[in-house]
């Protein structure tokens, strides 16, 4: 069966997993937006983010987690003011150390494209596209990606079938049977893609918090220890 496209998850897959204290990340925002109430605001931001991700998981992706902007507005934040712009920059800057691509990613994507395979990214994310693209561009990956779907731009999230359909459409109407998904989470990156008719490679290197794990009996088509192994596995699928 030929492989026409390989689609990657982003966090914990193209970019290695880091344990991050999400409330501290939000404190970097809060201490600029509202220094007097920074602690309380950081708690509210973290709780709102966590709630959206939980709703997405518990609805099997039917309830997407939306955009950062929609969350800010819901919390009464003035997203048009200068304080917000500075605070958002500080928040996103705080993520920088945790966003660097796996050192194997550049060679892997280059080799897949040399094999005539289209490369996609599908990420459950609240971040805006411009931020994802600036991160990928910094690491030299942006031009190696034929299409990306960030769920902040669509109403659903993984593992909802519309999320996988969206990236296959963006890649040029690819048949799920000709596509391979690569990711670090069994529910979103193996169960979802396989239920949609794709093959799935699991990269189980992430210390995913227990409360984010969804029980599933699904078996990946391949399990790898390092991202770079994707190339050999995909070539096996293609024979
Ligand atoms: Mg992931």
Image (cartoon, rainbow, N blue to C red):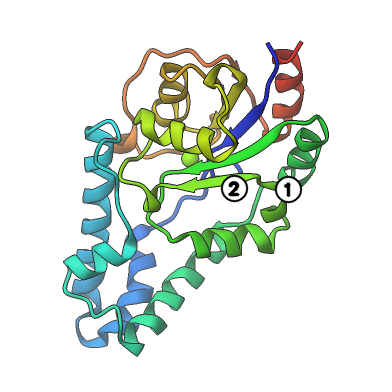
Is 91 situated above or below 234? below
| Label of residue 40 in the image | none
The residue sitting at 78% across, 31% down in the picture is 116
Residue 90 image-quadrant placement = bottom left
In the figure, is residue 238 to the left or right of 198? Answer: right
Alpha carbons under labels 1 and 2: distance apart: 9 Å
Question: Which secondary structure lies at badge 2?
Answer: loop
Q: Can see residue 64?
A: yes
Quick check: can you spot residue 159? no
Q: Is the CB of mark 1 within 8 Å of ligand 1?
A: no
| Residue 35, image quadrant | bottom left
Regarding mark 1 in the picture, which secondary structure is present there?
Answer: loop
Q: Position of residue 147 (x, y in %)?
A: 59, 45
For the point 46% across and 50% down, which residue is it? 19
Tell me where residue 105 appears, x and y as whole percent.
71, 44
Q: Is residue 239 above or below residue 87?
A: above
Q: Is mark 2 within 8 Å of ligand 1?
A: no
- Placement of the N terminus among the 4 image quadrants: top right
Q: Which mark is residue 103?
A: 1
Judging depth in this view, the residue of 50 and 112 nearest the camera is 112
Image quadrant occupied by the C terminus: top right
Is residue 177 placed above or below 93 in the rendered structure? Answer: above
| x, y percent for residue 34 | 25, 84
The residue at 37%/33% (across/down) is 162
Residue depicted at x 70% and y 16%: 2
Label 2, residues with CA under 10 Å away: few <14, some 14-19, many ≥20:
some
Q: Which of the labelled discs sits on residue 15, or is there none?
A: 2
The residue carrying pointer 1 sits among few (fewer than 14), some (14 to 19) or many (20 or more) residues within 10 Å by Cα, namely: some
27 or 120: nearer the viewer: 120
């Amino acid at each position: 069966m030929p492989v026409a496209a390989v689609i990657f998850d982003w966090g914990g897959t193209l970019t290695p997993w880091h344990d991050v204290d999400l409330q501290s990340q939000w404190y970097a925002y809060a201490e600029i937006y509202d220094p007097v109430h920074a602690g309380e605001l950081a708690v509210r931001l973290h709780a709102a983010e966590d709630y959206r991700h939980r709703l997405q998981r518990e609805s099997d992706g039917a309830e997407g987690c939306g955009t950062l902007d929609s969350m800010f507005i819901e919390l009464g934040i003035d997203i048009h003011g200068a304080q917000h712009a500075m605070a958002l920059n500080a928040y996103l800057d705080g993520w920088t150390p945790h966003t660097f691509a796996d050192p194997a990613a550049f060679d892997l994507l280059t080799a897949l494209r040399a094999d005539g395979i289209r490369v996609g990214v599908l990420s459950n994310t609240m971040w805006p596209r411009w931020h994802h693209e600036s991160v990928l561009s910094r690491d030299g990956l942006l031009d190696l990606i034929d299409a990306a779907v960030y769920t902040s731009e669509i109403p659903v999230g993984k593992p909802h079938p519309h999320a996988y359909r969206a990236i296959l459409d963006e890649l040029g109407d690819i048949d799920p049977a000709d596509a391979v998904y690569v990711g670090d989470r069994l529910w979103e990156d193996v169960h979802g893609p396989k239920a949609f008719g794709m093959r799935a490679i699991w990269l189980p290197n992430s210390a995913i918090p227990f409360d984010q794990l969804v029980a599933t009996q699904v078996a990946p088509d391949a399990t790898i220890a390092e991202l770079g192994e994707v190339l050999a596995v995909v070539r096996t699928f293609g024979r």
